[in-house]
Amino acid sequence: MSNHLIINNISPFDLALTLDCGQAFRWSLTDDGCFEGIAMGKYLKIKQLENSIIFYNTSQEDYDAVWKVYFDFDRDYNEILLKASKNELLKSISQNCGGIRLLKQDPWEALCSFIISQNNNIPRIKGIINRLCENYGEKIEGGFTFPTAEKLSALTVEDLAPLRAGFRAKYIIDAAKKCSSEINLNSLQELTLDEAREILMKIKGVGPKVADCTLLFGLGFHSAFPMDVWMKRAMAVLFDNKLPDGFEYCAGVIQQYIFHYARTNKITFEDKK
């Protein structure tokens, strides 16, 4: 397949910020200014040029069925930014990162990835995930798919030694066993946020932050609000530990704006803590 698909006038959208803001770990920037990665079992090479987005070797059918959903293109982010602009602080925070969109990832991949992300840095997270996929994923064009919970459930902690995942290996195995038997991740979408979070936290090593990342980035709970060190510091410094009223329905989007602001202004936060 050699056809390329060009999508115009998706606004707001910043491809680089969306793929490199810490919500997904299998995308990399190529020398020709494209991003490439594997998501939802498919390889994609993609590039943004001003108001156009080029999906290389992508059919309209794949775009409609996979990538439009993955990049959340049907959601009206202008409405969220308009609402944020009425709060002076959120307006300032969102000015340089309003192009971030929430990726709708495979729930199992999101859960496993954020288990791996605990007490970790992004290069090492990517390395562990790449080794996991190379060892236990399926070979496709461009690389390897993310291994299923069913496949990993048959492994032992010792089998994961080549990943160099440390203490996280036992959590990966427990998550795989539970998600291939007693926990149906997709069915969590039918529950309330609190109910779904409680079920995810039955998995060893899954606390509120990993659960909320899974719910936000893998299951479409846009009211989830993951809290890590940066977010706790940002919320304390900027918002007195409380999100402004009226943003509950899109709290996860606002969280990404604040998280990006916190990471890019870390010296300021360190000075104020």
Image (cartoon, rainbow, N blue to C red):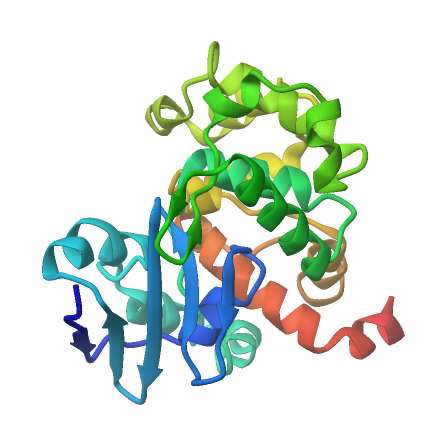
Q: Residue at x 36, y 29 (%)?
A: 189
Instruction: Tell me: residue 39, above or below residue 261.
Output: above
Question: Viewer-proximal residue, 128 or 81?
Answer: 128
Residue 22 spot, x, y in % from top left? 58, 59
Identify which residue is drawn at 64% across, 22% down.
173
Residue sitting at the far top: 182
Q: Position of residue 242 (x, y in %)?
A: 63, 53
- The residue furthest bottom is 50
Does residue 18 appear left or right of residue 269 in this picture? left
Name of the residue lying farthest toward the left: 60
Q: Look at the image and tell me whether residue 99 can be seen.
A: no
Q: Quadrant of residue 36?
A: bottom left
Image location (x, y in percent) of residue 157: 73, 23
Query: In the rendered view of the protein, which quadrant contains the N terminus?
Result: bottom left
Please state the horizontal and vertical placement of residue 50, each as a whole percent of the image.
31, 89
Res 105 seen here = yes
Which is more toward the observer, 144 or 247? 144
Foreground pick, 210 / 230? 210
The quarter of the rendered structure image containing the C terminus is bottom right
Q: At 31% from the left edge and 87% from the top edge, which residue is drawn?
A: 49
Left or right: 259 as drawn, with respect to 78:
right
Residue at the location (40% across, 38% down)?
A: 219
